[in-house]
Image: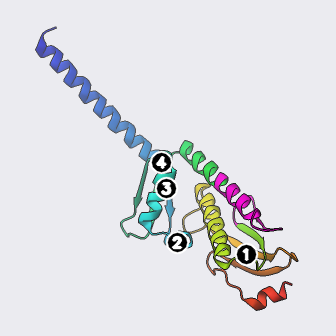
Amino acid sequence: MSRVKKSAYVLLLIIICVQLSACKQGETKENATKIVFSEKFLGIAQMSPEDWMTDLIDTSEGNYENVYVNDDGTTVTLEITDEQKEYWLTSRAELLDDLKSQFAQLGDGYKIEYNDDYSHIDLYYNLELDAYDAIYYVMYTETFCASQQLFSGTGHDEWMVSFNIYNSDTGKLVTSGNSDTGLSYNAADWEASM
């Protein structure tokens, strides 16, 4: 083969490869599921859109097609395939299990329970738990349960997590709340649960 024919052949091969690559990327994006992390979600996670996007990238092990802060600057979109969705569901379930184990080690009777669709959480602890630690565990449990709902197909504006806080010493309810109303309690609520 002459040098000109070889160069033309190599150039043609490169063009075909680039076109096939572009087509494949287009197909992947068309088949990708978009998971939108709303302003409400980011507020519960107490992270800026940029920080949440960075956290997703850092914990993804490459299991995403695209991740970006939306044009409005208040939400984050993660584009994933069905196979990648399984990674996220599994990894978040493992993080919830780790959180439950850590919490249980903080005190007698301390536990976190949640239902199968991740829409309800029960936390059991007492006043010996530092208030900041209590907030941390409630917030992260709610964040992981909300993300499980999103990865399972619940719309970004449809997810909801309700929760109850119980006195671990008596098993009595201290207070209830949800993702929209938040959670608050005072000394009188704890006294009533004694």
Q: Is residue 37 left or right of residue 141?
A: left
Q: Which residues are magenta?
A: 94-119
Mark 2 = which residue?
46
User: Depth-wise, is mark 4 or mark 1 nearer the camera?
Assistant: 1
Label 2: few (<14), some (14–19) or many (≥20) C-alpha neighbours in 10 Å: some
Graded by Cα atoms within 10 Å as few (under 14), some (14 to 19) or many (20 or more), the crowding at tag 1 reads few
Distance, label 3 to label 1, CA atoms, is 30 Å
Element on which disc 1 rests: loop
Residue closest to the eye, 82 or 193: 193
Report the Cα–Cα distance between label 2 and label 3. Answer: 14 Å
The residue drawn where x is 68% and y is 56% is 98
Image position of 125 with respect to 62: above or below: below
Earlier along the polypeptide chain: callout 3 or callout 1? 3
Residue 83 x, y percent position in the rendering: 56, 42
Is 185 left or right of 194, judged from the image as shown?
A: left
Q: Which residue is mark 1?
A: 129
